[in-house]
Image (cartoon, coloured by chain):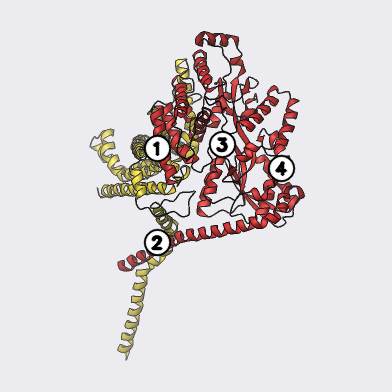
Amino acid sequence: MSEIVYNSFLEKNNKNHKFVMNESKYLPASLLLPAVILILFVVAIPMIYSLYLSFTNFTLIKSTGYKFIGINNYITLFRDPIFWRSFANTLIYITIAVNVEFLLGLVIANMMSHVIRGQGILRTIMMMPMMFAPILVGFQFKWVFNDQVGLINNILYSITGHPVIIPWLIQKPLGFIAIIIAEIWMSTPFMVIIFLAGIMSIPQELFEAADIDGASEWHKFCYITIPSISPFIYIAMAIRSLDIAKAYDLVSIITGGGPAHRTELIWTYVYRLAFTSQKFALGSSMSFITVLLSFAFTFYLFRNLLKARKI
Amino acid sequence: MKKILLWLLVMLIGISMLTAFSLVGCKTTTTTTTAAAETTAAAETTKAEGTTTTAATASSEKVSLKGVTIKAAFIGGANYEEMYKAIPKFEEETGAKVEIVFKGDGFQIDKKLKTDFAAGTVDYDVCWDHSSFFTQYIDAGGIIPLEDYWTNEELSDFIPMILDSGKKDGHLWIIPRHFDISALHYRTDIFGDPDIQAKFKKETDTDLKVPETWDEFQKTALGLQKILPAGMYATEFAGKEEALTGRFYEILTSGGGQFFDKSWKPAFNSDAGVKAATMLRNLYKAGAMPPGMTNFVWEDVAKNFASGNIAMYTEWYGWYSYFQDPKSSKVAGKFDLARQPMGEGNIYGGWAGQHAFSITKASKNIPAAVALIKFLTNYDQQYNESKLGFLVTRNSVWDKMIEEAKASTDPLAAKRLELAKLQASEDFRTPPLVAQWLPSSDILYPVLQAIILSDKEPKAGLDEAAVAVDKLMHEAGYY
C-alpha cells in the first residue's frame, strides 16, 4: 500500500516538476514579450513604413496619390554627386574626430589617473562640455570662428596688431576643421571618462610587477594599460562613431552644410532633401543607406570588441 | 524553445508589417476622409454663401461663438506676439476660446504645416502663412480658399498688390497681416563726407552718389571699397538659403529676367541671370563684401550694418527701429533710405513678402476661424501693429501712420513710410507663386554660393542649376 502511495506521490511530483520545467522554459520569453512588442511598435513599424516610403515618390506636399517606384530613389542618390560628397565628408569627419578624441581622451585619462588629490573636481570640470546641448556648442563656435567679431580673429588681431580677417567658416578646408574642432571640444570628455574608468579597473598588481621588472612608464602604458582597456576603447569608439555619424545640429548651426556643400554631412543633406526640398522619400532612402552602413560598422566594431575580450 | 522563439519573432514581424501596410491603407483612408472633408468644406462654402454675410461681418457685429474653441498655429517671437495680447478681447466679444497650439519661427511653422498636412494630423483651424510658402499648402491640400468668407467691401481696404500676392488659380488663400519689402539703406556720414567724395572722385572719375541702378550699385561698391578703412565693406548680401536666392531673384527680375518662363521651365540662366550672379561674384572677389557673407542670413547682415561696418546695402524695413536705436546701433541717425536700384529692364527691385493667416481644411468651425482672422486683421489690430514698426496692409491705417509720422521728430519717419507705401503699390513682387519655389531655391543657392566663391563660372553654374530645377518641375508634373 505504502509503495503505491509512494509511486503515486512520485508521479504527481514528476508532473509538477515537468510543469516547473516548462514554466522556466517559457518564463524568459513571456517576460520579454511586452518589451519586444513595444520596441516593434516604436521602432520597427516606423522603420518598415519609412523603408516602404523610400520605394515611392512620396513628397511632403503630395502625400496622397504617390506610387511605388521601385529602387529609383536609390539610383537617383547614387547618381547624385552631393550625396557622395556628403558621404565622403561624413567619413572624413568621423575618422578625424574619433581618432583625435581617442588620442586626447587617452592622454588626458592617463594623466588624470595619476592625480591623487582633486581628481573628483577634475572629472567634474572635464565633463562640463558634455553638459552643453549641441545647439549651444554650435552657436558658441559660430561666434568663436566668426570672421569679423570672432574670438580667434580678435586674438590674432591682438597678437599681430592689425586686423586679421580669416573667413574660418567659409574657406576650404577651414570650415571643415572648425566643425571638427567643435565636435572634439564637445565630446573628448566622454572618451576621458570611459578610459579613466578602464584605467582605474586595472589591477595594481600588474603595475607593481612591472615596476619590479624595471619597466618604464611608456612600457607600462603600452603593454599593460592599452591592452587592459582595449574593450573600453572599442566601446567608446563605437559609441562615438555612431554618434558622430548622426551629426546634424552642431553642423547645422555652425555652417548649415555650406557654403556650396563644402561642409555637407549625411544628415544635413537628409534634412535638406526631406524637408526643404520636400523629397521625403528620397530623404528616407538616404537614411536607410546610412542606417545599413551604421549596422555594418557596429557589427565590425563589436566583432573586434569580442576579439579584444578574448585576448 | 528556439523554434518557439523563432516562430514568435516571425509572427511579430508579420504583425508589424501588416500594421505598417495597414497604416499605408490608413493614409488612403485619410485621403478619402480629407476628400470627404473637402466636400464638406465645399458644401459648407456653398452653404456659407447665405451665411457669408454673417461671417463676413463677424468682426463688426460681434457674432456669438459661445462654447467654440478655435485652435491656431502662429508665428512666435517678441514683436509678432504682441498681437496675441488682444485675443482675450476677441474671446470676450464672441464667447469663443482661442487656443494657440503651436508657436515657432516661420521655417518651424512651415515644417510643421507640411508634416501635419502630409500625415493628416492637423488639429488647428487657423494657421500663420506667408506669400512664399502658401502655394505648398495648396498643393498639399491643407488650406481652403477664402474669397467666399470676405466681402469685396471688406477686402477693398487692403493694398491691392499685397492682396493679389495671396491669390492663386483664381482663389484667395491668405489674408494679409503685414508685409515687408526692401529699400536701399546707405550711410549718410559716408556718402555725405566731402573727404570720401573727393577720394571717390579721384579713384573712379565719377561723383559719389546713391546708386539708382544695379550697375551703379556695383560701380559705387567697387569704388568705395578702395577708399574705406580696413574692416569696413562697401556692401553685403545675405548669403545663404532663400535669403540669397531671393536677392538673386530680385536683381534678375529687375533686369528683365524671369525665374520661370510661362511654361514653368527654369529661365534664370538667361543673360540677366548671368549678369546678376556675376555682379555678386565681382563684389565678393573684390573684397567689397565681408568674406563670411556666404554664411550670413538676415540677423547677420543687419548686425553688420548696425555695427557700422557696411556703407550701403538692401534691407527690409522691419529692422528700422533696431537701426535707429543708439543702444543697439552705431548708425542711428546716420543713414537714409532710397528706392531699390533698378535693373536693365527699367524695373525697380522689389522682392517682397507678406505674413498672413489661412484657414486649414481640417478646421472644425470655419465661420469661427474666419471671425478670428477678421479680428486679427481689423483696423485696430493693424494700427497697433504699425506702432510696433510693422508695415501693415490696410490703406486706411497707412494714411493715419503717415499723418502721425509727419509730426514725428525722426526726420526719416514720414519718408520711410511714404517710400514703403510707394514700393508696396508699385514694386511689390513675391517669388513665383509655385510650391516648388523653396525646393528650387534649395537647388540654386548652393550654386550661387559656388559662383560667389569662384568655385563655378556664372553661366556654367546657373545652367547646372537650371537642369536640376527642370527635373524638379518635371517630377512635380508641370510638364
Decide: is B3 above or below B363: below
- Please state which of the two labelled residues, at mark 4 or mark 3, is closer to the viewer: 3
| Residue A124 visible here | no
For the residues marked 4 and 3, what is the alpha-carbon distance in whole angstroms?
23 Å
Q: Amino acid at mark 2?
A: Met
The C terminus of chain B - image quarter: top left
The chain under label 4 reads B
Decide: is A256 above or below A23: above
Query: Residue A115: horizontal and vertical position, in percent?
Result: 39, 35
Label 3 CA crowd tier, 10 Å (few <14, some 14–19, many 20+): many
Q: Which residue is mark 4?
A: B378
Q: Quadrant of residue B181?
A: top right
User: Which badge, 4 or 2, comes first in the chain's sequence?
Assistant: 2
Q: Which residue is mark 1?
A: B467
For the residues marked 3 and 1, what is the alpha-carbon distance in whole angstroms?
23 Å
Q: Are marks 2 and 3 on the same chain?
A: yes
